[in-house]
Image (tube, coloured by chain):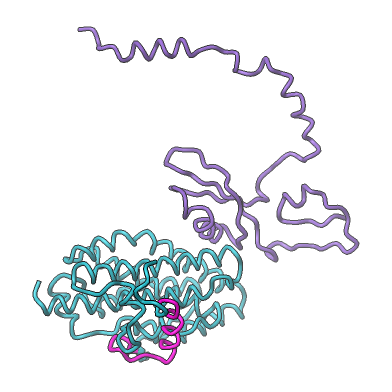
Chain colours: A cyan, B purple
């Protein structure tokens, strides 16, 4: 593998891992506060899954691409060195926002990992098989809640519509294109952000229609980009502060 | 008038009369669903507990994390508790004399000699 391709794959994996770590941490903030006990457990468990995905990706960086130790990489980097999307960074807000974010993000993950099943870089291809069942459950959970809340009366539906309107430009930012996309597509790593974005829209559109929600016209929406280049909302810094607080007391401690 | 619950186990307790009866309308409360866990394909689904959920689909979604995430699991059933027909507690006397009818037990039935003999024959090489 040449150096340019190695760098491109590292960029892709770092973004995927940072998204999973940051949103996993965010969603774990619902632990103990979920609307009902069953949902609290389910949502917390899925947050753990996300952190597991992040760990697996950081491990691939370490083992195959000369990356750092996953814990050091996750807890000691500065905010500007993270490449997560803005959607993952925002505070949990209400359950309407958090569920809509979960719905949009996990469908994006499902589309992304599905494309990686044909990935020419074997560690990513193997990981895509491993997480397939988890993501199936995550999207099943999201779809069931979406229908439930959109059919739970007009106020409930309106709140979900408002959450969709707010989340959609942010979620479109998951698919921020980069200069490495063409190289990765040519090398058979994955089809590139634009192709995933189109596929994601085709996945979520019928689900939203079924829930009587209006998808904002993608042609009219300006995706919220910047995260993949290290430009973040102020919320990321606060999150990193809290997430790494214990780890930084003694970064070399054995756990 | 006793309080009616959508959880039949609560009704079976016959908690007595309340001065102000609380009427529960269909859909006002979430339902209780019984969860049945299957450890491997072909095995019986075994009752493991229950979840609260607004509909069967979410009951399955919840059951998966409550009961399917630790030990081995290949499938789950959920059944609305209210859809299960059970005897009243006061009908327990129907079962009271079971222990006296030992002649119905299979415990006195000696078969191990026959089984062992059969097994012994099975390992012999077939006659040419």
Q: Across the whole image, how many numbered discs are drawn on residues?
A: 0
Left or right relative to B6: residue A245: left
The reply to whether the magenta stretch includes residue A236 is: yes
What residue is shown at x 45% (from left), y 10% (from top)? Answer: B114
Along the line of sight, the residue nearer the viewer: A35 or A219: A35
Quarter of the image where the C terminus of chain A is located? bottom left
x, y percent for residue A144: 50, 66
| x and y percentages locating residue B91 in the rendered image | 79, 35
Residue extending farthest to the right is B19
Question: Is residue A193 found left or right of A216 in the rendered image?
Answer: left
Q: What predominant SS class does the magenta segment belong to? A: helix
- Within the image, what quadrant is residue A182 found in? bottom left
Judge whether B84 appears above or below A95 on screen: above
Q: Of B121 and B18, which appears nearest the observer?
A: B121
Magenta stretch contains residue A108: no
Percent across and percent down for residue A23 are: 42, 76
Tell me the quarter of the image containing the N terminus of chain A: bottom left
- Residue drawn at x 37%, y 74% is A20
Q: Residue furthest top?
A: B127
- Left or right: B98 in relation to B122: right
Which residues are drawn in magenta?
Answer: A225-247
State the residue in front, B43 or B122.
B122
Q: Decide which of A156, A119 is in the foreground and name it.
A: A119
Name the residue at 61% across, 67% down: A36
With respect to residue A137, does A175 lie above or below?
below
Give residue A186's position: percent from left, percent from top: 13, 75
Compared with A24, B15 (above or below) is: above
Residue A119, located in which quarter of the rendered image? Answer: bottom left
Whether B22 is drawn above or below B123: the answer is: below
């Amino acid at each position: 593998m040449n150096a340019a391709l190695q760098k491109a794959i590292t960029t892709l994996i770092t973004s995927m891992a940072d998204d999973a770590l940051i949103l996993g941490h965010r969603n774990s903030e619902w632990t103990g506060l979920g609307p009902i006990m069953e949902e609290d457990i389910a949502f917390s468990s899925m947050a753990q899954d996300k952190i597991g995905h992040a760990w697996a990706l950081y491990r691939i960086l370490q083992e195959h691409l000369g990356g750092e130790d996953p814990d050091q990489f996750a807890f000691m980097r500065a905010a500007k060195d993270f490449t997560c999307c803005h959607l993952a960074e925002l505070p949990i807000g209400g359950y309407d926002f958090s569920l809509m974010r979960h719905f949009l993000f996990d469908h994006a993950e499902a589309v992304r990992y599905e494309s990686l099943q044909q990935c020419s870089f074997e560690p990513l291809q193997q990981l895509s098989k491993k997480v397939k069942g988890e993501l199936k459950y995550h999207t099943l959970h999201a779809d069931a809640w979406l229908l439930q809340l959109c059919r739970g009366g007009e106020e409930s539906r309106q709140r979900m519509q408002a959450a969709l309107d707010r989340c959609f430009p942010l979620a479109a930012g998951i698919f921020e294109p980069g200069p490495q996309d063409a190289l990765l597509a040519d090398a058979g790593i994955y089809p590139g952000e634009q192709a995933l974005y189109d596929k994601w829209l085709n996945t979520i559109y019928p689900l939203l229609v079924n829930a009587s929600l209006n998808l904002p016209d993608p042609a009219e929406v300006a995706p919220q980009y910047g995260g993949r280049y290290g430009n973040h909302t102020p919320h990321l810094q606060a999150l990193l502060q809290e997430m790494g607080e214990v780890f930084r007391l003694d970064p070399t401690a054995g756990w | 008038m006793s309080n009616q619950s959508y959880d039949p186990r609560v009704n079976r307790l016959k908690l007595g009369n309340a001065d102000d009866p609380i009427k529960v309308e269909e859909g006002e409360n979430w339902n209780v669903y019984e969860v049945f866990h299957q450890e491997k394909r072909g095995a019986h689904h075994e009752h493991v507990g229950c979840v609260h959920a607004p509909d069967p689909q979410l009951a399955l979604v919840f059951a998966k994390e409550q009961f399917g995430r630790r030990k081995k699991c290949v499938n789950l059933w959920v059944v609305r508790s209210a859809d299960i027909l059970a005897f009243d507690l006061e009908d327990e006397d129907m079962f009271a004399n079971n222990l006296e009818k030992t002649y119905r037990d299979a415990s006195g039935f000696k078969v191990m000699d026959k089984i062992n003999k059969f097994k012994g024959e099975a390992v012999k090489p077939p006659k040419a």
